[in-house]
Image: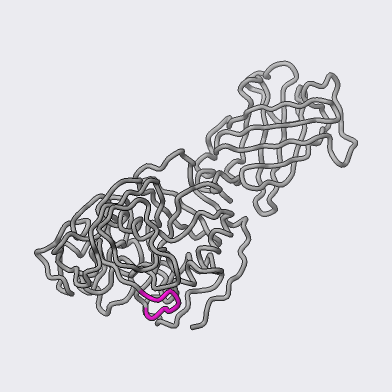
């Protein structure tokens, strides 16, 4: 197999749509935008206790490797809403999915297949590359227990939509299965289908059953009947676990599991989805949706015009005030008008913080008794703006030429650009 050649992607093309919260709630979604504006959505799965595996005698447990046992997961986590797509693979890896396993299902919205577990979770693989691009270490494959909890979505039946004992377990047509999964009963020839076309389970996840088997993080071993907490499976270098199903209906059950080689991609039947236990490092990022008028509530007549230039990663501020009081309502508040005092600041930004150089301009500066124009090409001071959200920021400044410094909160005057900002929270 020819392995993909990785290409480094610039970090500035990444952005994340999220609001950081202290703990996840069922149904929360976070969308990560990858290079080329390719989205990846992860969905919150709550911590809890569930029965993993199948009860004695469950129809379809032909391999007898699904010993039922109690599992406690102590932490909320996020799982990919769908299997990783070919567009997402190319955005992260910098090269298209390998085509060694056939070209019957090639396209942006089709799931990745024909990649090995090592190419996904090993050194230099998709997971490592994704973390490097996002500046985090949190992304990984789900553990087997996390995968099954996410797939069951609070149910104990063979499938989340029921035991479906009224249908055959091979490739017979089945109205109960049809809206929920791809299997040999509704796909002929049996090839991968685009992700997200079947109904999501009650946790908001698509294609947990059918379409492809999915790699998980665990090495394969037989399950024990003992209760476990936060299991991660055995270590070593043996076979890895695959979950989610294949051709026949019986093998798409929530408890179905097989083992396979981490270094061989034998066919077009195996893909994967991502997981993470933390959103740390994926906070708010400065973007052009912040372009607007901002002000400090505590100081009447004071405000800032902020302009973000993503192409050059620079932020510009025009900081203005009225000398004594607000002008009449029919007077437009334009920079440089008589009665204004103002300064500018500009500089680079990274993440949620801009570090700027202040230039005192013609017309004066806050708190100065007389107007002053800068003569220093290196500027008159520094300013840092740390954005907490699309509506709130903290400004810290020091104007060394005047010997003044302070820290003030600012917020938007108008809400016109909030929607844009929310869609570009990490750019």
Q: Which residue is drawn at 76% across and 22% down?
A: 339
- The quarter holding residue 289 reads top right
Q: Residue at x 24, y 53 (%)?
A: 51
Tell me if residue 264 is in the magenta stretch: yes
Quick check: 204 above or below 224?
A: above
Left or right relative to 66: residue 370? right
Name the foreground residue: 331 vs 27. 27
Left or right relative to 401: residue 118? left
Name the foreground residue: 264 vs 208. 264
- The quarter holding residue 123 reads bottom right
Residue 49 position within the rendered picture, expressed as x and y whole percent measured from the top left: 29, 47
Name the foreground residue: 80 vs 199. 80
Q: Residue at x 37, y 72 (%)?
A: 270
What main secondary structure does the magenta stretch of the protein show? Answer: loop
Q: Which residue is drawn at 72% across and 35% down?
A: 318
Residue 420 position within the rendered picture, expressed as x and y whole percent measured from the top left: 52, 45
**Span of residues in magenta:** 260-267
Residue 12 position within the rendered picture, expressed as x and y whole percent measured from the top left: 62, 55
Tell me if residue 36 is in the magenta stretch: no
Q: Residue furthest top?
A: 324
Residue 116 position within the rendered picture, expressed as x and y whole percent measured from the top left: 44, 74
| Color encoding of the figure | one colour
């Amino acid at each position: 197999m020819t392995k993909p050649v990785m290409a480094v992607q610039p970090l500035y093309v990444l952005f994340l749509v999220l609001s950081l919260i202290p703990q996840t709630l069922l149904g929360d979604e976070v969308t990560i935008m990858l290079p080329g504006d390719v989205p990846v959505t992860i969905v919150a799965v709550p911590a809890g206790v569930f029965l993993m595996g199948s009860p004695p005698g469950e129809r379809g447990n032909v391999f007898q490797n699904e010993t039922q046992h109690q599992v406690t997961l102590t932490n909320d986590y996020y799982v990919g809403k769908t299997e990783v797509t070919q567009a997402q693979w190319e955005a992260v890896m910098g090269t298209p999915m390998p085509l060694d396993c056939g070209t019957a299902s090639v396209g942006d919205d089709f799931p990745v297949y024909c990649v090995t577990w090592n190419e996904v979770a090993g050194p230099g693989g998709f997971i490592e590359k994704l973390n490097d691009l996002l500046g985090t270490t949190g992304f990984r494959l789900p553990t087997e227990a996390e995968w099954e909890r996410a797939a069951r979505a609070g149910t104990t039946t063979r499938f989340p939509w029921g035991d479906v004992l009224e249908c055959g377990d091979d490739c017979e047509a089945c109205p109960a299965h049809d809206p929920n999964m791809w299997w040999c009963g509704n796909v002929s020839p049996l090839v991968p289908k685009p992700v997200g076309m079947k109904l999501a389970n009650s946790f908001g996840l698509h294609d947990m059953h059918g379409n492809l088997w999915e790699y998980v993080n665990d090495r394969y071993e037989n399950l024990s009947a003992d209760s476990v907490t936060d299991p991660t499976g055995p270590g070593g270098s043996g076979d890895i676990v695959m979950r989610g199903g294949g051709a026949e209906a019986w093998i798409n059950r929530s408890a179905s599991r097989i083992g396979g080689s981490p270094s061989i991609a034998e066919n077009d039947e195996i893909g994967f989805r991502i997981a993470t236990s933390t959103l740390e490092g994926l906070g708010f990022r400065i973007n052009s949706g912040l372009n607007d008028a901002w002000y400090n509530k505590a100081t009447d007549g004071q405000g800032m015009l902020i302009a973000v230039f993503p192409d050059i990663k620079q932020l510009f501020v025009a900081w203005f005030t009225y000398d004594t009081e607000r002008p009449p309502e029919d007077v437009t508040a334009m920079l440089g008008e008589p009665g204004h005092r103002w300064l500018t600041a500009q500089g680079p930004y990274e993440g949620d913080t801009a570090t700027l150089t202040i230039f005192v301009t013609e017309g004066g500066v806050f708190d100065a008794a007389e107007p002053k124009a800068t003569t220093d090409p290196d500027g008159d001071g520094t300013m840092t703006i740390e954005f907490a959200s699309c509506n709130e920021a903290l400004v810290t400044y020091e104007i060394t030429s005047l010997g003044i410094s302070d820290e003030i909160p600012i917020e938007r005057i108008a809400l016109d650009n909030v929607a844009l900002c929310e869609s570009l929270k990490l750019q």
